[in-house]
Image: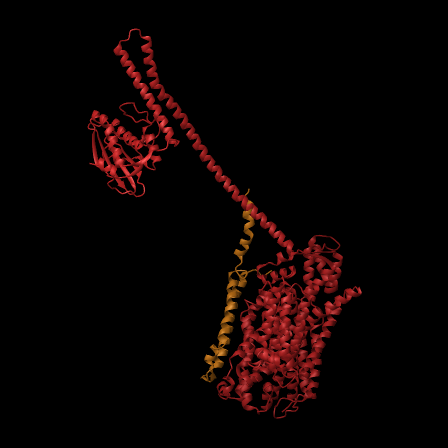
Chain colours: A orange, B red
Amino acid sequence: MGDAAPDSSADPDDGVAARHSRPGLEDAAAQRRWDLGVFLPALGAFLFVSPMVRLFAEPVSFGGAPGIVLYIFGLWLALILAAALLARMARRAHDGQEPPA
Amino acid sequence: MSLAPNAVLAISLLYVAVLFAIAFYADTRGAAGRSGWLNGPVVYTLSISIYCTSWTFYGAVGSAARSGLEFATIYLGPTLVFIGWWAFMRKLVRISHRESVTSIADFLSSRYGKNAALAALATLIAVIATLPYIALQLKALAASYQMLIGGAGGHSFAAPQVDEAMFRTAFWAALGMAAFTILFGTRNLDAKERHHGLVAAIAFEALVKLAALIAVGVFAVYVVSDGPSAVFQQAPPEMLYGEDAFGARWVALIFLAGAAVVCLPRQFHVTVVECLDEDHGRTASWAFPLYLFLISLFVLPIAIVGMTTLPVTADEDLFVLSLPLAMEAPSLAMVAFLGGFSSATSMVIVACIALSTMVSNHLAAPLALYSWRRSGLEPSSGDVQQFLLLSRRVSICVILGLSFLYFRWSGSSDGLASIGLIAFAGVAQLLPPILAAMYWPRATAFGAAMGMMAGFGLWAALLFAPSFAGAGAPPSWIVAALDLGAFDPLVTALFWSLSANALGLVAGSLLRAPSTLERIQAAKFVDVFRGASEQATRAIRYSAGSSELFILAQRILGAERALKIFEEERIRQGLRQGLPEADAEFVARIEARIAGTVGAATARAMMAEVATGEVVSAEALRGIASETARLVDYSLRLKDKSQELEQTAIQLRVVNERLQRLDAQKDAFLSQISHELRTPMTAVRSFAEILLETPDVTTAQAKRFLGIMHDESLRLTRLLDQILDLSQLENAQTPLRLSVVDPAYELDRAIETCAPMVTDRRVAIHRLAETEGLRIEADADRLRQVFLNVLANAVKYNTADQPGIWIESRVTGDMFEVVISDNGPGVPAEEREIIFSRFARGEGAFDAQGAGLGLAICRQIMARHQGGIELMPAGDGAAFGGASFRIRLPLRGGDRPEISPETADIAG
């Protein structure tokens, strides 16, 4: 009889913490999306911000378009595609879930 | 060339009518519940592109012509924010839906303890910062109209004179937009501030402006010029590769644009408040950046073509319009004008709706509440709704009026882009409190207010005030203190204002502890994905009278809606008639509904009048928590104690068993002793009796009998001595008489003592190995006693034909060892354990002289010497066929075999 009380009072917080990983998202897939949601903009920011950009800011031309223009717009498009892919992954996960309350 | 003003006006109004029709259509379908794709992600994403205003439509080209790729920063920032939807915007949307947030000011107020003052401050900041933004839309509209109808500008396509004609156009434009906005957005009060029709209309408008810009772009690249490569060849070199093109300003602008797409009131409204389903963000996360990409694609080409084709005096901001005009393409020019017109009006409409909501909820309503309370008026059901609607309409007119005044009084020589950036920097002051709201539970209303005031103050001083014509530069002391001349003024102002903001936020938050409500709201916001809201709501308990609650609900939500809500609750509670009981959960839900209309702070204030609220204080919460902690601690200690008790019980049991065993042993010992003692006593008594009773005993007989009696008495005495000896040894009563001895010497003496017995039995003694000169601290007599006992046993129990004893002594490690082996029958397996115990006597003893205590005494003696005596295991001992005993003694202090004076005499 004496064993029941301490064990049950120690458990509730452990259970909750085990179910939710930082920063408190619903499941592992959401966690991954969160991670990518931080990584993609960070990567984009890094690539858009000098000195990376300066590397391309030379007066060179590829097929008529200046290198810098191709770099900026090409990178832009690449990021959009990456985001679209991420959204596709999320849709597969979402279809398997119940709608949020 | 130019177009007729009437035609332009007619087409513009037609366009507005189309927008109205779309809005009406969407509203009707929404009311009928058949929204379908209208509520889908595509419409949602397109509505977010309200971000692109006439600044994008006209000003981007202007910026590109002046500063090259810098224009792209305005679209790269939001791209980065939206592709990171999962990490940031989604949380913003989730929180806002949970808390029924109606605006950005409501978001802040709700988070920071439902603070009305903070909401008012945020509203003021938002309104003042948006004024330049709306002004630039007016400027773009007026300028484009003037150019289209061929006003002053003619063939030079120069920037239209900012004169009375321009102001008049702008004034009428403002008036028109006020009318549109009031018609579009303030027809009724939606419980959640949703305007379905409006969203559909601006989604359509987004397509229009994209199509228009692309049309002009295609025209510029493929009609005016000869394809993309030709265009870029004509680009002036310093355009793309400026000195400091990608330096601090580039970074700052990307950051600023990202902040703006979150903090601009219209953006927050469209992205968060009008969001019907969080899942739409999945599409928006890539589709909105795609829209931005597409709309930016032709900006640079148009700018280049404009610069090379149009006269030098042409206003870059209007290239999109002047290019078709110059190239004699009137329909395209009209399309371009429509695109610009569309982007400007939709921005103004949405911005004014968002701002007027904030003004009415956070400025007007609290004031009205205060005055009603003061005057004791009881506004009736419909009154509050009427009042809210009226306040919204009035605020729309006021905002547009102020924007027009700003346009009138501002230095209008700046490009559209730079005016817009001032607005961006202003709303960016809302970013630090928003970030803290979502990620830092410790942030408080006081800190947020400090930060916002500091940041906004610096923004006003460094950017807003100087933008007025004739305002001059900031005072020289500020210039010196903040090193304003060193960098680009926008970047510097941004840096200082946001730093002051963040610093004020952090310092202010840490200065004072958060209130209980702030803490609860903080948990709800920061931990929104952990589902903490249920626990949080339980911490606030309201109780209210049902009828008062009903009256309040009617006032705010309208009679119909209130009735419906209360009916549902009544049914849920299982009552057949009357009002449902207003328990804490129901009251909380009503408050949430009301907050959806008037904002969290006002809702709370209204509830406070009607309900008696009890927020479980932080101390009480802590008290409960510590009580629980105490209980847990107590029960853990109990657990420890009971474990201890268990162990003690086990130990007691063990000891008890031992005591019982010893008790049994004692009984056995006593019975054995009495048996042993009785035997000789019987002999003595019987012979004494014979001597006494037999009349004629011969002297020889008598002598023999007496001899036997004497022997038995001796035996008895010996036995008693041994018993006493053993007892004394066991109880350590007799101290050992320690001296330095040579064990070899004692061994020899013992052998000598056995000599008679040995020769008698014809036992051969073999000395295998001997030690010399060892010094041991021991009791010499006792040691000799042990050796004697073992040797005697070896003789007594040896039944071999040719009995022999082998003695081997050696030093092993730090122990002295003697092994005495015989070739007798050895010790049978079953007796190995007990030979050292008392009264155990082996079989085959030749005489019964020993009482069986000998080995027991030996063991005690060796134990007292920290040594030992043991029977060697069968394998080793069987070397000679019989038993083999090993006696060990520790050498003291690393004694080395050496010749000592005592042993020198004996050895050899």
In the rendered image, the quadrant that contains the N terminus of chain B is bottom right
Quadrant housing residue B615: bottom right
Residue projecting furthest to the front? B901
Q: B874 left or right of B636?
A: left
Point out residue A32 in the picture as x, y percentages from the top left corner. 50, 64
Q: Is residue B346 above or below residue B712?
A: below
State the image coordinates of residue A79 (x, y, percent, origin top left). 50, 73
Q: Position of residue B342 (x, y in %)?
A: 64, 80
Outermost residue toward the bottom in this view: B155
Where does the C terminus of chain B fall, quadrant-wise? top left
Q: Which residue is the extreme one toward the top?
A: B695
Looking at the picture, tell me which residue is in the foreground, B702 or B671: B702
Q: Quadrant of residue B800?
A: top left
Name the quadrant containing residue B315. Answer: bottom right
The answer to which of B301 and B200 lies nearer the viewer is B301
* Residue B652 shown left or right of residue B568 in the figure: left
Query: Residue B783 vs residue A55: left or right?
Result: left
Q: In this rendering, does residue B476 appear at all?
A: yes
Say which of B63 and A10 sits in front: A10
Measured as percent of width and height from the top left, residue B226 is found at 50, 88
Can residue B420 be seen by looking at this rendering?
A: no
The number of discs equals 0
Comparing B347 with B525, the one in front is B525
